[in-house]
Image (cartoon, rainbow, N blue to C red):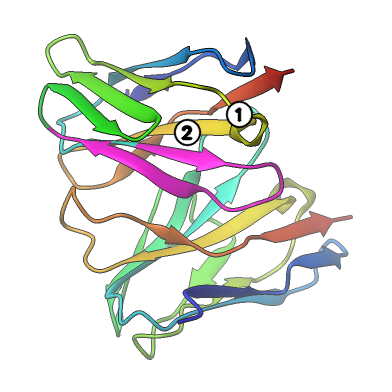
Amino acid sequence: GQNIDQPTEMTATEGAIVQINCTYQTSGFNGLFWYQQHAGEAPTFLSYNVLDGLEEKGRFSSFLSRSKGYSYLLLKELQMKDSASYLCAVMDSNYQLIWGAGTKLIIKP
Amino acid sequence: NAGVTQTPKFQVLKTGQSMTLQCAQDMNHEYMSWYRQDPGMGLRLIHYSVGAGITDQGEVPNGYNVSRSTTEDFPLRLLSAAPSQTSVYFCASTLAGGSGANVLTFGAGSRLTVL
């Protein structure tokens, strides 16, 4: 079966760095997405990786290793507004998205 | 542009009632989809459409119907509501579904409770 694993919850301190991991087993691979979802709101797009390596976008970076079925989202200089759930999703060989359950990130002052 | 508009935001139904969740987008997106989000689970695809007049089932289609008569609108119908359909529903769209680079734009969500 297809599976996306990510930690249920993480806690970090304002100003620090946090890495949220995502491992996947899917039938085929057409890219990996990270979305941010604040409580009670819709998911919003953060990043897309289809080739191995690191993609940097401001305070957020996303890394992909296709051979290991692994990705991480790196958040630097954490701010209170970064408290949210972070959703990892993989597009399979049929171009369907398989979603992880999300990682709830709690930022403490 | 309004993006993806979903209505209603909240709804309470009794078991056996029917209702329609509305979804409209003004971005000329060909691909539209409906997801449900339940605690501790990833988003699950209910139905999707790759263009007007074309719909297909996702992972959890039972108990739901859709239609796509126009590019803009993609309503989701609950035929006979059951408590297991209590969830948060998201409509999402993108330019074309058959590409890994196409990012989904989500509506604000509809929280449905079935008693």
Residue drawn at (45%, 21%), measured in percent from left and top? Answer: A76
State the image coordinates of residue B84 (x, y, percent, origin top left).
72, 46
Q: Does residue A99 appear left or right of residue A101 in this picture?
A: left
Question: Magenta residues, as a range?
Answer: A34-50
Q: Is residue A12 visible?
A: yes
Q: Does residue B102 appear left or right of residue B115 in this picture?
A: left
Q: Of callouts 2 and 1, which one flags the residue occurring earlier in the amino acid sequence? A: 1
State the image coordinates of residue A10 (x, y, percent, origin top left).
61, 13
| Tag 2: amino acid | Leu
Report the disc number at residue A79. Answer: 1
The residue beneath circle 2 is A87
Residue drawn at (35%, 35%), measured in percent from left and top? Answer: A58
Residue B70 higher or lower than A106, as above or below:
below
Considering the image in quadrants, where does the C terminus of chain B appear? bottom right
| Tag 1: amino acid | Gln
Q: Is residue A91 visible?
A: no
Q: Nearer the viewer, residue A47 or B19?
A: A47
Q: Image quadrant of residue A88?
A: top left
Furthest residue in direction top, as rendered: A68
Considering the image in quadrants, where does the N terminus of chain B appear? bottom left
Asked whether B18 falls inside the magenta stretch, the response is no
Q: Nearer the viewer, residue A78 or A43?
A: A78
Between the residue at mark 2 and the residue at mark 1, the CA separation in whole angstroms equals 18 Å
Furthest residue in direction bottom, as rendered: B70
Residue drawn at (19%, 37%), measured in percent from left and top? Answer: A31
Element class at badge 2: strand
Q: How crowded is the residue under tag 1: few (<14 C-alpha within 10 Å), some, or many (20+)?
A: some
Q: Image quadrant of residue B76?
A: bottom right
Q: Do residues under tags 2 and 1 come within 8 Å of each other at their CB atoms?
A: no
